[in-house]
Amino acid sequence: MSQNTDFLPFARPSIGKEEEEAVLRVMRSGWLTTGAEALAFEKEFGEYVSAPHALAVNSATSGLHLALESLGIGPGDVVVTSTYTFTSTAAVVRHLGAEVAFCDVAQGSYNIDPDALGRLLAATRNCRAIIAVHVGGLPCDMHAIKALGKRYGCSVVEDAAHSFPSVTADGYAGTLGDVGVYSFYATKTITTGEGGMLVTRDPRIATRAATMRLHGFDRQAWDRYTARHASWRYSVTEAGFKYNLPDILAAIGREQLKKAVLFLEERQAIAATYDKAFAGVNGLELPPKGEGHAWHLYSLRTSPDRGGPTRDDIIEGLAERGIGTSVHFIPLHTMPYWAQRYGLSPDSLPNAVSMFERTLSLPIWQGMGMAAAGRVAAAVLEIAGGKSA
Ligand SMILES: Cc1ncc(COP(=O)(O)O)c(C=O)c1O
């Protein structure tokens, strides 16, 4: 067994002096909630991904909620999304009183299967939106999804929680549909601890989301307590939410944004190390590839039917060697809430279940270093070698 027993976590944020100084600057400024830093972060992020409207929010979950609300989704509507995602992608649909129709992935892919999506849309009445999730940072087939959206009259929302800074020939993933939402949760490539960004080209979506993000105020009243003139007056035009991103977090995001390309390059190098180590190894399948992979996740698959180790053999073997892992995702249709609500069994969407049962996510984060990547690869090979036919 490998000798190095220092614990290597599955994920760890990269916070440097720049982020620390930015936080101190805001703490000393006398303005802790949403204000100038959040506005600057929105401007810089919007310019970065070439989105005319960028709205900072306190999580991707709240951004997805705002996105669907801004599209007018409500009771009687259906929203289609993949079962292979995190629960909040679908929960926000229920928050609006609409229903979810779950779609399968294609065998070998973690993203929604456009063929299955076409069949599901043909069979679903009242579908108003598709949520495409770029799982692990690999963009979905947006051409096919947008064509289906057009054909069936559905808006296309991108759950881009994993995909910054993934860029394709058509632009950044997250800016390819009607509205996209990024996550800056602590494990994401750039982080604010908790946070997110909604982007859109549609000024109506942007205006509605901005109103609903902050209590349904008729204007963004950031300056209510500091302006010299009578800025205290505002009107409440809707029963809005409280989804704004505070300046302390926005200041971290601004610094992280400057490092996004460096972070991506490190992740690409780690992914390349893993690919090289695992290519051609009996019982291991490399993650799917494609244009603009952000490498938020490196999801390795096992094929025990070919004599290789099981997913759990590798997870346990790595844990014994002091290496953290995770699993993305437990398909939503196998979760009690979703299974019961829609009468689904694991067999209803079999590809997702087969992918999940064989998948584990290995550590991939900037700052972990190539030696650590080599250590993970060697440990996986040791475990797989011990089990291979
Ligand atoms: C695919 C996906 N969508 C949405 C979210 C929600 O992100 P947040 O934690 O920023 O609300 C997550 C969380 O990790 C996710 O993995």
Image (tube, rainbow, N blue to C red):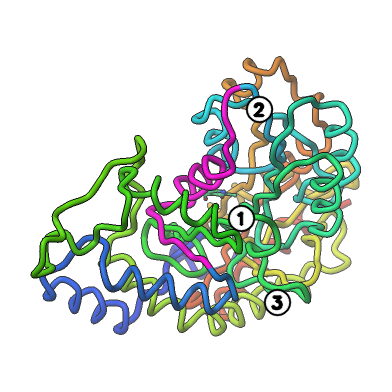
Q: Which SS class for mark 1?
A: strand
* Magenta residues, start to end: 53-75
Quadrant in the rendering for residue 276:
bottom right
Of residues 159 and 234, the one nearer the viewer is 234
Where is mark 2, residue-wise? 77
Of residues 312 and 83, the one nearer the viewer is 83
**Residue 359 left/right relative to 304:** left
Where is mark 1, residue-wise? 179
Amino acid type of the residue that numbered disc 2 sits on in the rendered structure? Asp
Can residue 237 be seen at all in this image of the molecule?
yes
Asked if 208 appears above or below 260 in the picture, the reply is above
Q: Which SS class for mark 2?
A: loop
The Cα atoms of the two marked residues, 1 and 3, are separated by 34 Å
Where is mark 3, residue-wise? 273
Question: Which tag is nearer the camera, tag 1 or tag 3?
Answer: 1
Question: Quick one: label 1 or label 3, which is nearer the N terminus?
Answer: 1
- Which numbered marker is on residue 124? none
Asked if 238 appears above or below 298 in the picture, the reply is above
**Residue 267 left/right relative to 22:** right
Q: Where does the N terminus fall, quadrant-wise?
A: bottom right
The Cα atoms of the two marked residues, 2 and 1, are separated by 18 Å
